[in-house]
Amino acid sequence: MAKKPDDILALSFEKALAELEDIVSKLESGKAELEDSIALYERGAKLKAHCEAKLKSAQEKIEKIVVGGNGKPKAEPAEFD
């Protein structure tokens, strides 16, 4: 049974990333049939977008929780390298 795209929204970042890694492995193996590969690729693209949105949300939360030199919370951009 194929999963519905709507279920992606309910996934945590970690579960979405694990599923995305599984999809990449399946696609890289070259063993999936063409139609299955297309469906996997489409779901992978949606999972990637979901993970990116979760990361952006986390980054925005971190930017709100930075503490200034005086010990008081101070908002400043977070940098991720």
Image (tube, rainbow, N blue to C red):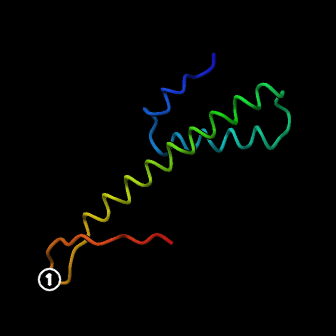
The quadrant the N terminus occupies is top right
Q: Looking at the image, which residue is at 28% across and 72% down?
A: 76
Which residue does the numbered mark 1 point to in the structure image?
A: 70
Farthest-out residue, top: 1
Q: How many marks?
A: 1
Q: Amino acid at mark 1?
A: Asn
Q: Position of residue 81 (x, y in %)?
A: 51, 72
In the visual, does 22 lie left or right of 12? right
Give the image quarter of residue 45: top right
What kind of element bears circle 1? loop
Give the image quarter of residue 75: bottom left
Crowding around mark 1 (Cα neighbors within 10 Å: few <14, some 14 to 19, many 20+) is few
Q: Looking at the image, which residue is at 43% across and 48% down?
A: 54
Q: Position of residue 7 (x, y in %)?
A: 48, 27
Farthest-out residue, bottom: 69
Q: Looking at the image, which residue is at 46% across and 69% down?
A: 80
In the visual, does 67 lie left or right of 1? left
Placement of 7 over or under 56, stated as above or below: above
Q: Position of residue 70 (x, y in %)?
A: 14, 83
Q: Looking at the image, which residue is at 50% across and 47% down?
A: 51
Q: Position of residue 24 (x, y in %)?
A: 71, 43
